[in-house]
Image: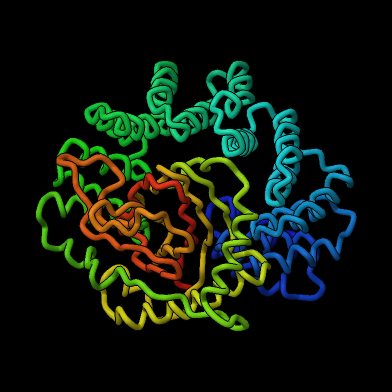
Amino acid sequence: MTAEVVRQAWTLLDQGRSTDAVALTRAPAASPLAGAGMLIVHAAALKGVDRHDEALAFNRRAVAATPHDRIAWYNLAATLGDLAQAEETEAAIRKAIALGLDAPEAWLVLGRALQGQSRYDEAEAAFRAAISRRDGFGDAHRNLAQLRWMRSGDLVLALEALTASLARNPADSQLILLKSTVEEFAGDKAAAFATLNDALIRQPNDALLLLAASHMAGEIGQADAMLAHALAAERLVPQAPQVLIALAEAHLAVGDAAAASQTAERLRAIAPLDQHGLALQSTAWRLSGDPRRAVLNDYEGLVRAYTLPTPEGWDSLDAYLGALRDRLAQRHDLKTHPLQQSLRGGSQVPSLHQSPDPLFQAFFAQVRKVVAHYLADIGPGDDPLRARAGGDFRVSGGWSVRLSPNGFHADHVHPQGWISSAFYLDLPGGVADADRREGWIKFGQPGCVTRPALEPEHEVRPRPGMLVLFPSYMWHGTRAFTSPEHRLTMAFDVVPA
């Protein structure tokens, strides 16, 4: 009977029904007599509903029950890696490898754990080991290319291993997409577009290639090509959320606000919590003059700035911020930005909300107080932000960005968020100039092409110790700055618990 429940649970997970798998396995996994198979599948189900902290306890029980099982150790390492526990991840995955697990996935987990400890040469070696065991292993290629790019800012070096694998696997669309992504975020958008177009000559019905080509066409100003690629993708997978996002953006690019609005409505029906859909709907309404956008873009009511309360144990906020700056200076040890993030010209430190460091824990403890204050300030309502309030909430991501001179955040939204943020530690001198507004955070300027082009609608001048909160669906970015100082921030997303 137990084996049948485990089998059914894995089937549910394969079908994307993680909530059902959790319900099916909850009681048998809670039993002190539960076997490793039951514990592992329950942990996998919990991870499927983003309950990684709870999953970890079941992975630990599975290892305790079968201490010589390499798969149990691998699963423990993977969950620890999800929780950014780099040192313990390394220990667990090395145990799995020592027990005979030589799979490429194991070396990928090891590489990520080493990178999380800033042991970059060793991390690169582990990613290369993963690729040597599976030549077209896209996740390992992505991690290696991104790490080399962030360490060096050298596009050729970043693409070295990927180029070699593509020579052996020229039709591998995952590797082609990755190559174009690296080229795009290294600043060579023309090359990224050419990479995709060359691939589409051979594989004209690959929906993922079409979506990427649509995006890149917009990036280089070819709105008609953008729409053509998006329509081709829609014919292949008409209900896929990513297809509807690309199609709505393409309609905005050619100036068809009505079609963009209709497509955004389709997206919101399929994925009602996707913040990108709200942003696209708002943008279409803005272009067409639809008054419904006023509820979504109530900048005065929904964008609010607070001073972070001084954490317990510190005499003053300035003293705490000084210690936080010093700790972040140690962590920002890479040269340039990661792939597919908003920052340009700077470095990013991820997963700070999961760090055991008391400085970061103190920050997020104060964050909870400010978010609660924000929710009280905006009050109840039935709009997309307020309608999700009323219960508890949790931080779903936390990171830091250090921008260099001429650096900025491209305009973007946080698709899986609810409430987003910006917290300021160090600011460049140009922030003080109210005319140039260098380094200011701006809202309302779309991160996609529109016809006509749209300007920001609201801006906030930052200051050290300020925490700005706003809906995750609002377009936001920063103005570039030219003064020689850096710009140091932290940020996080909050979602209902």
In screen coordinates, is 137 left or right of 263?
A: right
Q: Position of residue 295 (x, y in %)?
A: 20, 67
In screen coordinates, is 16 left or right of 247?
A: right
Residue 307 higher or lower than 175, as above or below:
below
For the rendered model, the colour scheme is rainbow
**Residue 451 appears in the rendering:** yes
Q: Position of residue 81 (x, y in %)?
A: 68, 55
Could you say which is closer to the camera, residue 258 or residue 442? Answer: 442
In screen coordinates, is 357 left or right of 220?
A: right
Residue drawn 9% across the image and 55% down it: 289
Residue drawn 34% across the image and 45% down it: 239
Q: Quadrant of the N terminus?
A: bottom right
Residue drawn 58% across the image and 66% down it: 324
In screen coordinates, is 219 left or right of 112?
A: left
Q: Position of residue 416 (x, y in %)?
A: 43, 58
Q: Position of residue 363 (x, y in %)?
A: 55, 72
Residue drawn 31% across the image and 46% down it: 447
**Residue 268 appears in the rendering:** no
Image-quadrant location for residue 3: bottom right
